[in-house]
Image (cartoon, rainbow, N blue to C red):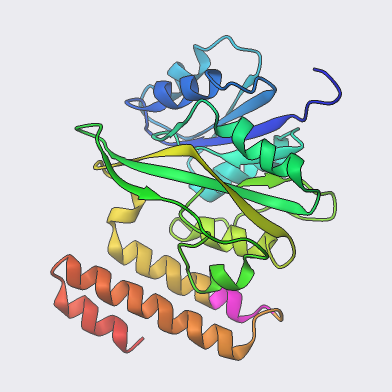
Amino acid sequence: MPENRPLVSIIMAVFNADQFISGGIESVIDQSYEYWELLVVNDGSTDRSGEIAQSYRDARIRYFYQANKGVSAARNLGLRNMKGDYFCFLDADDLLTTNSLSSRLEIFQSSQEVEFVDGRVNVFDSRSGETVREYLPCFEGNPFNELLSISEKCFFGPTWMIKRLENKSYCFLEGLTHGEDLLFYLSISRSGHYQSTSSLIYLYRKGHVSAMTNLKKLEKGYFRLYSEISSWQSVSSERSRWFHKRIKSIMFKSYLVSGNIFNALKVVFR
């Protein structure tokens, strides 16, 4: 690999995704930027996910297996083994666009202070393939307070590319299956500059069984996240209270939309 070309590590946690994993892996292989490694972490799948992942003979693809411990533990295994100068995540049922890596690297190359780069995301229907929503970040600067507000100005999901720094620890809270992306970003963004590209970088699949469809688990994850950040010295009591109010509002509205009035009212008094 040429010395002036940074290596990008892409971490893919996989659990029973044999319907989709080929598309995800091939979207990485099709990148216009060639200097990447894909770390596929099979989190105890009981379907053909592992077999499919290991069928690819590209030397840039590295395969790992662990007994089922959840997405956070799987990503941590990838983080411990990555070699890249930059890293990002790709869920096994989602896709990267052809210029996903190159367009984000251009932002990094434009400024030494940039540590996190995001971009435009299209949400597509799993059945029809049609785009049902577009996310475009609209923030620049340190993202910590925006993340505490659960603001869509700089947060959609696992779409950031991150510059790997020696003085930072990169680790997900294991056992957390909902809100893990947000907590991870909060843990690494108390310092650092966020910027985004207007280019389309990520295709997010909607319309099949996913973590976000289980509202009770989402509620549990958010309040676990609240418990974690409330103990951080960098988070004032005022901001902690605001975060608590924000997650209650999100869950109240989510339960109402789902028709679950009882749980919507219960969450108000948490």
Would residue 78 be seen by someone viewing this image from the given angle? no
Q: Could you tell whether 254 is left or right of 262 in the image?
A: right
Q: Could you tell whether 254 is left or right of 27 in the image?
A: left
Which quadrant: the C terminus? bottom left
In the rendered picture of this protein, how many numbered marks are placed on residues?
A: 0
Which quadrant: the N terminus? top right
Residue at 71% across, 35% down = 81
Would residue 6 be seen by someone viewing this image from the given angle? yes
266 is higher (above) or lower (below) than 148: below
* x and y, in percent, of residue 50 in the image: 46, 23
Using the image as rendered, state which of residue 63 and residue 46 is in the foreground: 63
* x and y, in percent, of residue 224 in the image: 49, 71
Magenta span: helix, strand or loop, mainly? helix
Using the image as rendered, state which of residue 118 and residue 250 is in the foreground: 118
134 is higher (above) or lower (below) than 60: below
Residue at 58% across, 43% down = 75
Q: Could you tell whether 171 is left or right of 181 in the image?
A: right
* x and y, in percent, of residue 197 in the image: 57, 45
Residue 205, by quadrant, is top left
Residue at 47% across, 19% down = 26
* x and y, in percent, of residue 208 in the image: 25, 41
Provide the residue span drawn in magenta: 227-232
257 is higher (above) or lower (below) than 265: above
Residue 125, by quadrant, is top left
Using the image as rendered, state which of residue 115 and residue 103 is in the foreground: 103
Q: Is residue 62 magenta?
A: no
Residue at 55% across, 67% down = 147
